[in-house]
Image (cartoon, rainbow, N blue to C red):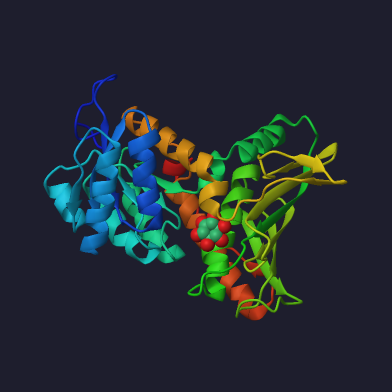
Amino acid sequence: MGKGALTRMLTPDNDDLRVAIIGAGRMGADHAERLARRTRRAVVSAVVDVDHDRTSTVAAETQELQDAPVEALSSLEQVIEAGKADAVVLATPGFLHEEALLRLISAELPVLCEKPLTPGSQSAMRVLEAESTAVRRTIQVGFNRRFDDGYRQLKEVIDSGELGQLLMMHFQHRNPAAPEWFTEEMLINDSVVHEFDALRFFTGEEVASVQVRTGRQTSQGTMRDPQMVLLETTSGLLADVEIFMNSGLGYQVEVQGVFEGGVVSAGHSSGLQTTAAHQQSWPISDNFHDRFAESYDREIQEWVDAVRDGRAGGASVWDGYAVAACCEAGVASQQSGQIQSVSLIERPAFYA
Ligand code: ISE
């Protein structure tokens, strides 16, 4: 069996991809549920977490939803050693990713790694170096916006050139309230991380510089909030991101492209619009799990299909590395208020 191919042969129609979920927190449990309930040609074979109770609960709940047994395990090593999975969803906290990814690369197991790839560009580079000695990509980074319908449609408008040159982009990223444990750095590393990837996705360019400005502050929460993040791509396209963690307004993530021939927005609520009592209204989600549910479903299904076909899709380790470098520049600019340049190594031909 060649490097990068599945370690077990699957038949096209009736054999399911066995997926182990590593990390049984909110995101891991969510992915287990969508794999068991809504994903074709895949089953969850194991749930792994150091928290025994959580592992057993998620494994039992997942098993209820599918026709195949789910093992509750406590280490990734058990999955690899005993050949318990054909592929892995890595949903542990980011600081645990590097070690797991290096092990998974050496075991040749395809991975969908929840963002971030790793918390810093140095660790991301070590993963990149390890993966790029393989025959093909086995790691997909879970930047789910790439699978959102509106984002994809906007990308098509940009690529088609039908409205002329893209001149500028505006991003709006509002959460109703930051969790208690949320830090100011996380505002960049956990939230704006998506816009770094999205701008690269839309333009096909790297981010050249990042500047974070803080102005008037909400009285809600404990950190400087909202913040304005200004980005410039390598060709000079400018973009701004309003990140507002304690907006109190619900979950609103939108993007607008300003073209020579028009303006296109994506990300508005897809619910019903109501006109009554002299006003129009539409629903706003409370959280990203609801707002982006379809994009997560599509991300997992397309990943399963790609793994089964021996292909790689979505964001690569290169994307994860480039975004980690943007985050470092963003956090540095939070401190300095200055424009921070983003410097990257030369892109290896492996990620062309
Ligand atoms: C969270 O981790 C996400 O990934 C959400 O998409 C983002 O909107 C939120 O701010 C993050 O905390």
**Observer-nearest residue: 209 or 174?**
174
Q: Quadrant of the N terminus?
A: top left
Q: Quadrant of residue 187?
A: bottom right
Please state if 198 lies on the left or on the right of 348 as rendered: right
Camera-side residue of 272 and 141: 272
Left or right of residue 62: residue 30: right
Q: Is residue 270 visible?
A: yes
- Horizontally, residue 163 falls left or right of residue 246, namely right
**Front residue of 301 and 138:** 301
Identify which residue is drawn at 45% across, 66% down.
120
Q: Is residue 251 left or right of residue 180?
A: right
Identity of the residue drawn at 72% across and 77% down: 217
Give coordinates of residue 333: x percent, y percent: 63, 74
Viewer-proximal residue, 26 or 161?
26
Q: Is residue 325 visible?
A: no
Toward which corner of the image does residue 248 lie, by quadrant? bottom right
Residue 76 to residue 307: above or below:
below
The single residue placed furthest to the left in the displayed view is: 82
Residue at the front extreme, as displayed: 277
